[in-house]
Image (tube, rainbow, N blue to C red):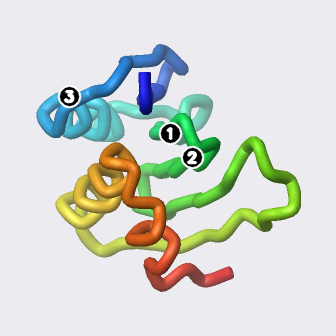
Amino acid sequence: MPYFMNNLMGESTDSPDEAQIRLILAAFQESDDEHTDVSLGHESGWTLSVFRDKRLLWENVEDTDVSPREGRLDSWDDVVDLILELSRGNIEAVDTFGWDS
């Protein structure tokens, strides 16, 4: 399992394809204040969390020396594209996104 995605309820889907990723993100339309994010975790330890306002959190949960970074995208298509980069193991593409911090 090179990657997995957690939905708003914290349930994991192993190696979701683009259609499954879009379904997981579509649940934001019915989200509440208790369930605020979804995330894609890669076997490398890198995780990309997405919030309903398209805010992003990029962190390596296995390397505490790496500071988490935040950013925001304008469209859900851009969010999907970045998630797909991580799912393919293209850490560099995600890492070079214009992070705020």
Callout in the foreground (2, 3): 2
Q: Residue at x 47, y 80 (%)?
A: 96
Please name the amino acid that badge 3 sits on. Gln
Quadrant for the C terminus, please.
bottom right
> Along the horizontal axis of the image, is 1 left or right of 61?
left
Q: Tell me the distance, in whole angstroms, between the alpha carbons under discs 3 and 1.
A: 16 Å
Q: Amino acid at mark 1?
A: His
Position in image of residue 73 (x %, y %): 36, 72
Circles 2, 1 touching at the beta carbon (< 8 Å):
yes
Give how far across and how far down residue 68 sits, in percent. Answer: 72, 63
Where's residue 95, x and y in %? 51, 71
Q: Which mark is residue 42?
A: 1
Q: Residues within 10 Å of mark 3 (few under 14, many from 20)?
A: few
Q: CA distance from mark 2 to mark 1?
A: 6 Å
Answer above or below: position of 79 versus 31: below
Give how far apart the Cα atoms at labels 2 and 3 are.
Answer: 17 Å
Per the rendering, the mark at residue 20 is 3
Q: Which residue is mark 2?
A: 47
SS assignment at label 1: strand
Q: Earlier in the sequence, mark 2 or mark 1?
A: 1
